[in-house]
Image (cartoon, rainbow, N blue to C red):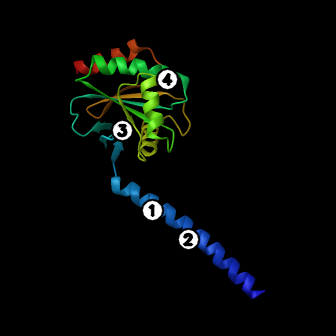
Amino acid sequence: MHKKIILSLILVSSIFLQGCNDKSEETANSMVAGNEYVLTDTDLKQIVVQKQGEGYTIEGAQNKIIIFDIFATWCPPCQESAATISALQAKYKDKLIVIGLTIEDKISNDDLITFKKTYKADYSLANSDQNRRLIDELAKSLELGERFPIPVMAIYKDAKLINHYLGAVEEEFVESDIKKALEK
């Protein structure tokens, strides 16, 4: 009888401690990066995003407009938005950086490259373990809640939010925001 109790206690303790170890490792990884997110895009280029106050900047992209596009490859409005965002990236190439952040955990790079080619998403698509962390932080700062519709587009310049959109949006609206931000 005592052997069963002791065995049960050992089993429960090991499960409990394993859970604690996973959580503390996750917390340690978050603390190491602090307000910095190191993303890797489909071209294996690193993008360093930094939170500054209420906004975001990208290392080496001072005075540029940054658009974060939160999307999923299976989402029809996201697929439709890709060409719109690409057109803006091409038009404002020296003044605009677009970063696509997929909500899909553990998506293959090949699947993202297929999305990029199929829907003409000619901008950086991040495929990183930091995506979820940055998406959660963006959603929190935009007050979207834990569950929100996609796509979400957030536009920043000099660590200040210019505007954000939920769902598919017409190119003219986004371009209007870009022009206003460039005038500042």
Q: Is residue 52 visible?
A: no
Pointer 1 residue? 25
Marks 4 and 1: CB-CB under 8 Å?
no
Within 10 Å of the Cα at label 3, are there few (<14), some (14-19), or many (20+) other Cα atoms?
A: many
Query: Which mark is on residue 79?
Result: 4
Quarter-wise, where is residue 7 in the image? Answer: bottom right
Pointer 3 residue? 41
Marks 2 and 3: CB-CB under 8 Å?
no
Q: Secondary structure at mark 2?
A: helix
Residue at 34%, 57% (x, y): give it: 32
Q: Earlier in the sequence, mark 3 or mark 4?
A: 3
Q: Earlier in the sequence, mark 4 or mark 1?
A: 1
Q: Earlier in the sequence, mark 2 or mark 4?
A: 2
Pointer 2 residue? 17
Quarter-wise, where is residue 182 in the image? Answer: top left
Q: Earlier in the sequence, mark 1 or mark 2?
A: 2
